[in-house]
Image: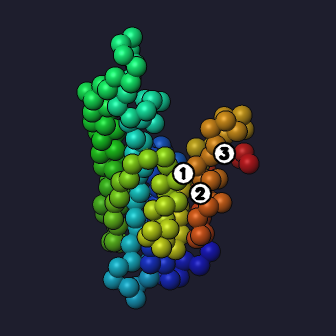
Amino acid sequence: MDTSGSLTCVVVAVDGSEVSMEALRWALDNLKLSSSSSDSSFVVLHVQPSPSVAAGVSPGTIPFGGPSGLEVPAFTAAIEHHHKRITETIMDHARLIFADRSVNVKTQVVVGDPKYKICETVESLHADLLVIGSRAHGRIKRMFLGSVSNYCSNHVHCPVVIIKPKGDSSE
């Protein structure tokens, strides 16, 4: 991989897992941004799930023995608040990793399905590289849940570096 400083935008996706934070460390330790562009940056990206995805229901509607389709905005608001607190914690952890580095790092939070939103963000930023951790789910779990890193590696139009957990030798 060419790390000679021709990169202007490197997106590093973080989800709070240790392997995603290791991906951030790897990118900061091993990649050099272009010095010819003042806009060159690492973009630390977190995708916050939408409340409907987290609750497994349509947004704002939760039947609980009452009329079908009854809106429960307090429930949706509570989920949103919970996700915002988790996101703040994840981004605070990421900031601790890049705080003492002398590189340009931006943070970005989007809401939705991680595999789609990571790809959309990489494309909209015209990223030169995506760095993402692999949670190394077993083959059965990966078959049912899908792999965000696998999906992204097949759908973005830039190179992808996938960081595996230490000690993982699985495919």
Residue located 33% across and 83% down the image: 38
On screen, residue 93 versus residue 118, left or right, reads left
To which residue does mark 3 refer?
168
Say which quarter of the image contains residue 79. Answer: top left
Residue located 45% across and 29% down the image: 57
As shown in the figure, which amino acid type bears the numbered disc 1?
A: Lys
Q: Can residue 48 be seen in this view?
A: yes
Is there a contact, CB below 8 Å, between mark 1 and mark 2? yes
**Where in the figure is residue 6, as x and y percent of width and height?**
50, 83
**Separation of marks 3 and 2 at Cα, in angstroms:** 20 Å
Residue located 34% across and 71% down the image: 104
Observer-side mark, 3 or 1, equals: 1
As shown in the figure, which amino acid type bears the numbered disc 2?
A: Cys
Image height check: is 71 above or below 43?
above
Ranked by sequence position, the earlier of labels 3 and 1 is 1
Res. 70 mark: none
Ranked by sequence position, the earlier of labels 1 and 2 is 1
To which residue does mark 2 refer?
152
As shown in the figure, which amino acid type bears the numbered disc 3?
A: Asp
In the rendered image, the residue lying farthest to the bottom is: 36
